[in-house]
Amino acid sequence: MSSVIVKKAASSKTGKRHQPYDSSKRSKVHSKHPTPSNHSSYANKTPTTKSTPPARSTRPTRPLHTIRELAEKTIRKHYPYFTPRNDWEVLYLSDVPYSGSEAGLYEQLDNHLALDVQETGSYEEVIERATKDLDEPLDMTGLKPNPGDPNVFVQPLPGSKYSIRLFPGNAANMDYCLDFVLTSTGEPVNSPFKFELLCLPNPNAPIGSAPIIRMCPLEHSFGIPQHKIEPGEEKFLLHDGQHCLLRRPGQRDVRFTVPIRRRPEPEAPANTDVLYFPQYID
């Protein structure tokens, strides 16, 4: 999955280098509506419950992700023998597949760099543009977090050696992602046990009721079958404030709510008076 994202992010041809996933273009295969006969009792079921302490969150000690981070990850995976000599090579190899010999790789890089320099007129300008592209921050959905990334929350699952991890995606779309990690190491794993992940109606909604949705991995909506998801890359797409239920055979149900990122108060339209009433009353 990461290499797919890198290619979309680093392409210099499309003019959409830094765009996050487009929610409107996602296939709906990652979410399914259960039939009422099978799942109508999920939202209303109120067994005895146990509360766990608040999930721990990492502090914002790192900057946002960048194209450089994704590009270097791709190079380490596909070209472990190669150390880029400049930023142009980092950007180039993140987007152009190569399957020849190591000597052939150096030759291809030298030839294409020479063409870019000839077209641009300056080696320094070519490298400077590549550096600028690589260092541009990303607000992307689906990128697994690094140690120290902000707003990452982990909660151990009762009766299991695994934990649920929630990490933020694109803020404008209010995307949040879920994956499973080993509690002892924090290493992400793909679907380590049988389960159903359901999104439930908001119990605090004053009117109306959203359907119960059974979630599938985000990779499925991009046409990647379960057995082809790279180890540790599986994730589930959620959104700020969603109420979720995890069902495991032989285990108690687990409920949780996705964190909500604070947003600035919207400005009142011009020439408008705003009246404020209590939001919650007893």
Image (cartoon, grey):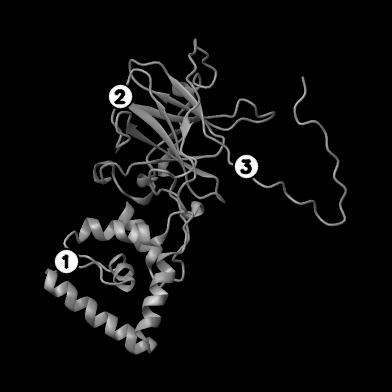
Instruction: Indicate the position of residue 31 as horizontal and vertical percent values.
Output: 44, 39
Q: Callout 3, which amino acid?
A: Arg
> Could you give the CA–CA distance between mark 2 and mark 3, rounded to whole angstroms?
32 Å
258 relative to 120 in the view: left or right? right
Upstream in sequence: badge 2 or badge 1: 1
Instruction: Indicate the position of residue 223 as horizontal and vertical percent values.
Output: 33, 50
Q: Alpha-carbon neighbours of circle 2 within 10 Å: few (<14), some, or many (≥20)?
A: few
Nearer to us in this view, 45 or 94: 94
Which residue is at a point 34% across and 84% down the rendered structure image? 123
Q: Callout 2, which amino acid?
A: Lys
Q: Secondary structure at mark 2?
A: loop
Q: Secondary structure at mark 3?
A: loop
| Residue 161 badge | 2
Label 3 belongs to which residue?
Answer: 262
Nearer to us in this view, 111 or 243: 111
From the viewer's perspective, is residue 143 above or below residue 11?
Answer: above
Which residue is at a point 49% across and 10% down the rendered structure image? 48
Report the mark closest to the observer, 1 or 3: 3
Q: Alpha-carbon neighbours of circle 3 within 10 Å: few (<14), some, or many (≥20)?
A: few
